[in-house]
Amino acid sequence: MNKKIFLFFLPVLISEGSLFAQSESVVSGIWERNTPKSVKMFKVVNGNLSEVASSALDGEGRFSMRFMPEKEGYYVLGISSKATDRYVFYLKPGDPLNVRVMKESYQLEGKENTPENLEMTRWHDFIFPLEDKAVYFMGKNSTYVDFFPLMEEKLAALKSYKVKKTKNKKFNAAFAEYRDYNLLYTALQFIYSIRSAHPQDEDFIDYYRQIDIPSLSATTKVLNYPDGLRTLVSAYMLHSKLSGISGQEYAKMMGNPANALLKNDAGTIKNDTIKGEIALMFGHSSRTVEGMKEYKSQYAGFLITEDQKARWKRIEDSYQEKAENKKPIDFTFPNAEGRDVSLSDFRGKVVYIDIWATWCGPCKREMPSLKELEEEYKDNKDMVFMGINVDVSKNIQKWKDFLVKEQLPGVQLFAGDMAGSALSKPYKITGIPRFMLVGKDGCLIYMDAPRPSSSEIRAVLNDALKK
């Protein structure tokens, strides 16, 4: 009897195994750009990337990996989840993909690539001149002066852009939306990246003023795209800036974007699930336990799906006070008069440190709030505000001029070319502005302290001053 049962089920097991193998997608090719150790595939989950497969590169840069696409849709091939060195493709279970990533772009190889990805690649070739300036901008010195005319040129060319319909109706509908999203993503990447010159409000072309936030947030479709939610939020911020609000109002909005998106202008963001994702997105911005509790009381009500509530619970479970409780590495930098000043000179005082640069837009946006904060604590002899500039050493005069122009108070120091070894490496600084808080005992309280514009900062400073 047992043998008969075994023989009865054997063909079924083989059949299921065969179907499983047929549903796997094989992604292969050659990676000629830089020298990464591996190439990865990512799925898109709530607008974020989650790794599903990886392959080491051989001596010639070749790679090959198998994975099971959970569903038909967009997947990303790249060396990391960052915007650079990654490309979006459309896969169904079982679809093959063969790609050659070259120095500046990519091309499909062989005859097995699907009609969907042939269309994805044709679109990428069309938008590549914009992407090249918006994403791969380092060393190219592209500014709005050359980007905006190119953008308008591409917008005009779109009117005659011919889409080749595939037999996949689901892809055809999704691809029409993807093109609009990808154009918006690229346009915003340019605006929110480091440039030698940034446009004033009047310099923006009409495309940016016509971004339809209610339409973009009416459904959850934006979550199907890489960085979809961040693109929506960035579009909202820029659209608000161009709508004529004052610089002070804009700085306040940037200081508490969750409040702006979910409460002050709740009618603009239409979809309730999107609101929940926004609440989750900015839930990570709290720097203290107190701040986390306050944020929860304000925004946890926007979490409507069980998945959102579960992810919020994981944030709470894993959240730890960002207190290092160890003696900071001492540093010494010159002030504007050329006199060396050390962090250890202020032992016995609470030191709030701002690491910034003259070219850093987000740094400048925090300065009004920082000045306001310094004014509030100016009579407290135990409170010190310290600014450390990380411009390259040859721009020291630019820094000095900036101090005079902006009338920056507090202790102002210049790290220059020493910033990497003396600040970035020991304090794990990967972006600015970065704020740190040192206690009276010289121990680091927060390696990544709340910003001056945050609702948490005063409670944090007051608590440090009590100790």
Image (cartoon, helix red, strand yellow):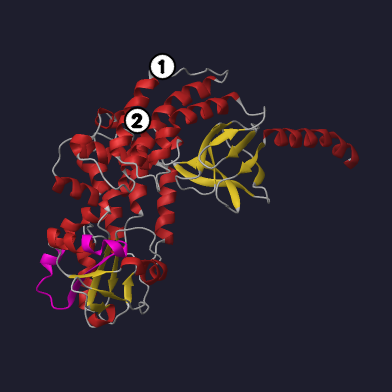
Left or right: residue 56 versus residue 350 is: right
Label 1 close to label 2 by CB (< 8 Å)? no
Residue that appears at 21% across and 47% down: 253
Assign the N terminus to one quadrant of the image.
top right
The residue positioned 48% from the left and 19% from the top of the image is: 163
Residue bearing mark 1: 160
- Residue 124: assigned label: none
Question: The residue tagged with tag 2: helix, strand or loop?
Answer: helix
Q: Nearer the viewer, residue 369 or 417?
A: 417
Residue segment shown in magenta = 373-398
Q: Nearer the viewer, residue 57 or 320?
A: 57
| Cα–Cα gap, marks 1 and 2 | 16 Å
Q: Amino acid at mark 1?
A: Ser
What residue did someone put label 2 on? 150
Question: Is 101 within the magenta?
Answer: no
Instruction: Give coordinates of residue 57: x percent, y percent.
Output: 65, 50
